Image (spheres, rainbow, N blue to C red):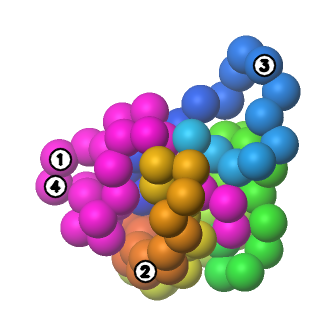
Amino acid sequence: MIGATVQTGGAVQLDGATVDEVVAGSPAEDAGLEDGDVITHVNGQRVTDGIALIVAIRTHQPQETIELTVERGGEDTMQVRVRLDGKVG
């Protein structure tokens, strides 16, 4: 897990996974993710929504570092590295 909740229901979203909340002290916070960020890729592989992001993350092992492509404010795109936590959630 990365320590962030993402939108997984509602309207069909094909442009990435929108971060609803970043948990304090989590790998997501350590990587600089913020509420409202949109994660579009995991290790270069496109994710279209929150479910696709969860599936992509779960293919990796705890303590592994992954690279996320993140859009912030609809304009800025950046790469962040996140070291996965082994906790359930």
Residue 41 vs 23, above or below: the answer is below
Amino acid type indicated by mark 4: Gly
Which circle's residue, 3 or 1, is located before the other in the chain? 3
Which circle's residue, 3 or 4, is located before the other in the chain? 3
Q: Is residue 21 found inside the magenta-colored segment of the image?
A: yes
Which disc number belongs to residue 25? 4
- Residue under numbered circle 3: 11
Amino acid type indicated by mark 3: Ala
Residue shown at the point (62%, 63%) measured from the top left: 57
Label 2 and label 4: CA atoms lie apart by: 15 Å
What stretch of residues is rendered in magenta?
A: 19-41
- Residue under numbered circle 1: 24
Looking at the image, the residue that sits furthest to the top is: 10
Q: Marks 2 and 4: which is nearer the front?
A: 2
53 left or right of 4? right
Residue shown at the point (50%, 79%) measured from the top left: 79
Amino acid type indicated by mark 1: Ala
Is residue 89 in sight in this rendering? no
Image marks 3 and 4: residues in contact by CB distance under 8 Å:
no
| Location of residue 54 in the rendering, given as x and y in whole percent from the top left corner | 65, 50
Which circle's residue, 2 or 1, is located before the other in the chain? 1
Q: What crowding class fits label 3: few (fewer than 14 Cα within 10 Å), some (14-19), or many (20 or more)?
A: few
Which circle's residue, 2 or 4, is located before the other in the chain? 4
Please state which of residues 39 and 61 is positioned toward the viewer in this rendering: 39
Label 3 and label 4: CA atoms lie apart by: 30 Å
- Residue under numbered circle 2: 81
Residue 19 vs 10, above or below: the answer is below
- SS type, badge 2: strand
Please state which of residues 89 and 82 is positioned toward the viewer in this rendering: 82
Label 2 and label 1: CA atoms lie apart by: 17 Å
Is residue 19 in sight in this rendering? yes
Q: What crowding class fits label 4: few (fewer than 14 Cα within 10 Å), some (14-19), or many (20 or more)?
A: few
